[in-house]
Image (cartoon, rainbow, N blue to C red):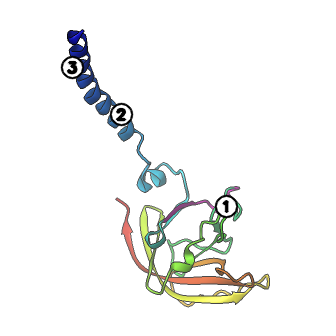
Amino acid sequence: MNKIIGLGIVLLSLLIPITFYIFTQVRDYNYEISIEEKLVSNAYYAIIEIDNISLKRELYEINDPQNNVDKNIFVHEKSTFPSSSNSNIILASHSGIGSNAYFKDLYKLKINDQVKIYYNNFIWSYVIKEIEYQEKTGTLYLKEEYPEMLTLITCTKNDAKTQTIYYASLEKKSPIG
């Protein structure tokens, strides 16, 4: 009986490291696709990343059915992406508590915080320059005071009557990779 128990312990001591090795290999194989791979494979039109609030989300082309504020971050039809001068990427998303509230933590952003857009094989790094509040009237009056800018729009936290607009200016452009 002692021989059987001893043999079981030996087999178990061999199986545990083998099982661990197989598990880690399978886990490492199921990695997340990197931003570079997503853009190269044309899985998305662009990606927004805001490290301060742990936001990384794909953006869809203006005419794509997925470009809808009820599904994703909305790219406004008046947006112009950087590739020529005087671009202004205008993005809007819900705040609050829903599964599509991608801008729920935008209120944490401050002047000089950074927002990155991955687009057209480059990382476009923007810096928040102004934060403005406007009443919800059905019409927004957006500034266009910077030659290359990004505009983020969402509802104001704890205020159902206003919207918050974040204006950012392009700081630098770097190749992806």
Membership of 37 in magenta stretch: no
Q: Is residue 150 visible?
A: no
Q: Amino acid at mark 2?
A: Phe
Q: Residue at x 56, y 76 (%)?
A: 106
Residue 51 picture quarter: bottom left
Residue 7 in sight here: yes
Q: Nearer the viewer, mark 1 or mark 3?
A: 3
Q: How far apart in space, not on screen, are marks 2 and 3 (Cα)?
A: 20 Å
Of callouts 2 and 3, the N-terminal one: 3
* 2 relative position to 29: left or right: left
Please state which amino acid type lies under the numbered disc 1: Asn
Q: Nearer the viewer, residue 73 or 38?
A: 73
Residue 60 colored in magenta in the image: yes
Q: Which residues are magenta?
A: 55-65
Q: Amino acid at mark 3?
A: Val
What's the residue at 42%, 40% (across, down)?
Answer: 30
Percent position (x, y) of residue 29?
38, 38
Residue that badge 2 annotates: 23
- Residue 24 in which image quadrant: top left
Total number of numbered discs in the rendering: 3
Tag 3 or tag 1, which sits nearer the N-term? 3
